[in-house]
Image (cartoon, grey):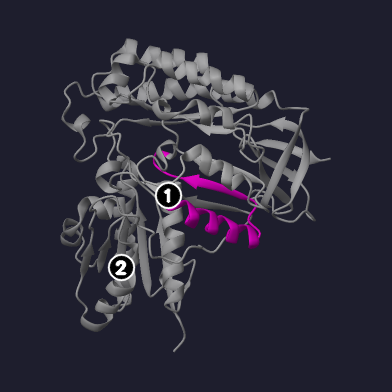
Amino acid sequence: MGPKKFFIQTFGCQMNVYDSERIAQILTARNYRPVDDPARADLILVNTCSVREKPEKKVYSALGRFRALKGKKPGLLIGVAGCVAQQEGEGLLARVPYLDFVLGTKELKKIPEILDNLESSGDRACAIALDGRIDPYGGLPLFPAPGGPTAFVSIMQGCDNFCSFCVVPFVRGREVSRPSQNIREEIRTLSEKGVKEVTLLGQNVNSYGLRTAGEPDFVRLLESIDKIPGIERIRFTTSHPKDLSPGLIGAFGRLSKLCEHIHLPLQSGSNRILGRMNRGYTKEEYSGKVQRLRAACPEISITTDIIVGFPGEEEEDFRETLKMLERIQFEEMFSFRYSDRPRTRASTFAGKIPEESKQERLAELQALQRGITQRRYKAWEGREAEVLVEGSSKARREEKTGRTRVNHIVNFPGASVAAGSLVRVRIQKALAHSLRGELI
């Protein structure tokens, strides 16, 4: 009998992508092989996100599609992992009778045990322990298989901030930092396998090491990674504005491999709403940190998250958010309509905004940011940029695609250029969310 086959569908953030790579690593060690078509799989795993309502709904839609496959192949195993699994637990098994197992965010290492039990007894399983500050990757092999010149590396998981709208502390747990030695070993091995750029992941990377005796803080960790041979670029996400330290700001002008880009979620431009969100900073404090970032690193690009329609958001609060967009001039923005999340304080707040009003505000916000993004991208026309080639362009296979240090996507003719190459490109044209260029 040949190896069994598995298919993983991933929803949500980069952390989920990393977790899916870890799960694939565990399954491969059990003689499973990945397939791109769920109809060919012996095991289907849906790795889920519940930070917003829309990705959560997509999970149930996907499970509905996979039900027909199980009808045709009774031996097919279907599991749900990630945030929705952690959030719903046994309730997910009750709601989806053809589901075989539920795997929480800190239970990845239990996959072999669950599969063994399913094969021997057929008993459905639910593993969702979320106790204490436990490293979910502890005891797992260090190195997920790289799929190209870039790789994600988790440095911590969980969050202690308890923003009133956010479900992360309830589905990812409290903040826990991975051992810095493990992180550096993982990055060194990725470098040996051809990875040139690593993105460090955490719900709040600024807090790395602060609650773990003997570990460096985030800036010291960056300094040590900056010295690893073969790694040309370092990125990180996400950074909480209230914890953005002077040392981290200064690192952008000091560490040669740290890319000139930071994702710094603002969420709202109204101090009243920021207070209701429990964000821990004012718009003035946020603006001051942006000014210091740009003083330390004039080329830095800043991207952000914005929520519209938070409970109690008046028209004037929304106007304050628009003013912040004009003041800060973000490179890009990820924007969302507020939706209640289970167990969060904001879900109990009065003053819910009608969906029609939220959609109108979102459309106005996005229109304003489109104009800002277009102007900032257009300013690159005629300039040169260093691009890390990631592979062939999706739109034109004869072209290559990659990213600049400030995180702009660039497409350019270059059929003979290998993935992983660092090349100089002259920017010819700015598009909506990418640039076109030519090799120098």
Tag shown at residue 110: 2
Q: Is mark 2 on a helix, strand or loop?
A: helix
Is 117 located above or below residue 93 in the figure?
below
Q: Is residue 317 above or below residue 5?
A: above
* Three-letter residue code for mark 1: Met
**Residue 95 covered by magenta stretch:** no
Q: Residue at x 41, y 43 (%)?
A: 209
Q: Which quarter of the figure has residue 406?
A: top right
Q: Where is residue 230 in the image (x, y as percent from the top left)?
A: 68, 53
Residue 195 highlighted magenta (yes or no): yes
Estimate how packed mark 1 is, as few (under 14), some (14 to 19) or many (20 or more) residues with alpha carbons within 10 Å: many
* Above or below for 73 versus 261: below
Above or below, comparing residue 389 to residue 107 in the picture? above
Q: Which residue is drawn at 21% across and 52% down?
A: 88
Which residue is label 1 attached to? 15
Measured from the top left, where is residue 276 in percent x and y?
Answer: 25, 22
> Quick one: 133 or 416, which is closer to the camera?
133
Q: Which amino acid does label 2 sit on?
A: Lys
